[in-house]
Amino acid sequence: MSIFFKDISKHQEISWDRLLDDLNNTRTFNPYYKSDDYYEVFKNIIVSMLLNKEIVLLDSDFTGNELLTLTGQSSFDNYSLPVDTKLTGLGNKNLLIEKLINTKDGWQVTIFTSGTTGIPKKVTHSFNSLTRFVKRSESQQNCIWGFAFNPTHIAGLQVYLQALLNGNSIIRLFGLSKEEIHQEINARQITNISATPTFYKLLFPCKEKFLSVKRVTSGGEKFNTQLAAQLKELFPAAKITNVYASTEAGTLFASENDVFVVKNEFAGLIKEEDGELLIHSSLMGYSMDMDTEWYHTNDLIELIEKYPLKFRFLSRKSEMINVGGYKVNPSEVEEVIHSIPGVKEVKVYAKSNSVLGNIVCCDIVSTTTLEETAIRLYLQTKLQEYKIPRIIKFVNALETTRTGKLKRN
């Protein structure tokens, strides 16, 4: 049996034949789709493509008030449309994929940003913008994807379409425990994983090595050499790639380290201004919030070369902490704290202070007993005084966003 999707959290194992049956028996389609069932989300995306109807993907945990704010509606039951006849020509997997590859230019999907730094924004993508970097070849047809994203967000959509258009199996990893993830990688011999650095950090510590994994992709947050080394230890047979992507633009750059080089095809469409990365509107999905030629990404970068443009991602502009007039990059402080043996995860953030405006604080998840005094002594040898956290808390876990990134606010 050829598996389309497996989700141990819902006791699902869906074959490609079952997917084809479900598609052939579809009688209604709702363009506003909200569900915590990944299979149903995946299936309804396919239905929308086959019908050439726009689909709006809503996070399963959006509250009624959030939906009202974002869409002007709190319920979408009345939006269901009848599908009068069977979705024909779906006799086998290859025919389905052929139809999907020929999706018409008019098809669109609307998604919402994660709202990491504010209210989620609505962004609409076409088939072409979502599949800009999808690779199809014989060598891709045997891939087994570990799915480590929310399916209603840009990264999840892109991974899904890469797997779908190559007829691959998709194994859910997002939201599982470390032990369950390890088990699924082994049991299904997963070959490809794409995830955020926060997700990958959850896999450690681990004494196993997963030799079936051939490609590991990281994106959505800052990627550093320490994490790259850990991933190479865990997945020794894998090629490790770091990608830059956003909800508004999709995936734009890929690198084997933390330095990105803009390809010739994007020359003149990507630029740096006052330390911020700007993207030309022609590379973007449609958003009502964007009415200028250049989109300000809010991402601060270190410019390495101008021609060709070569840069390193530093942090989100909104995440910089102002301490008495000094700017602190939380990613820099996190990287130093991460180098302390026994630190599994760390989050550095600001707390209001009447004298300095803000002070630096941090939450640490450790794998062993750590002393705050020892941490401070170590940081004094690595960081300037104003960058050292005034408050250090030891916690059991760090909160993440709907998309699996570290929650900053």
Image: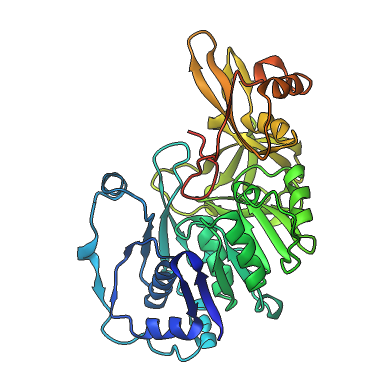
At x 58%, y 71%, the residue is 163
Left or right: where does residue 218 sit relative to residue 104?
right
Residue 67 vertical placement versus 337 (above, below):
below
Q: How many marks?
A: 0
Colouring of the image? rainbow
At x 46%, y 46%, the residue is 114
Residue 264: image x %, image y %?
A: 72, 54
At x 69%, y 44%, the residue is 223
Residue 85: image x %, image y %?
A: 29, 87
Residue 49: image x %, image y %?
A: 42, 73
Left or right: where does residue 291 sit relative to residue 239?
left
Kindly give the residue lying farthest to the left in the view shown: 78
Where's the N terminus, which quadrant?
bottom right
Kindly give the residue lying farthest to the front in the view shown: 369
Report the front residue among 393 and 331: 393
| Viewer can see residue 129 | no
Residue 26 vertical placement versus 328 (above, below):
below
Residue 255 vertical placement versus 341 (above, below):
below
- Quadrant in which residue 104 is drawn: bottom left
Residue 179: image x %, image y %?
A: 61, 58
| Viewer can see residue 99 | yes
Report the front residue among 299 and 214: 214
Left or right: where does residue 272 sit relative to residue 79?
right
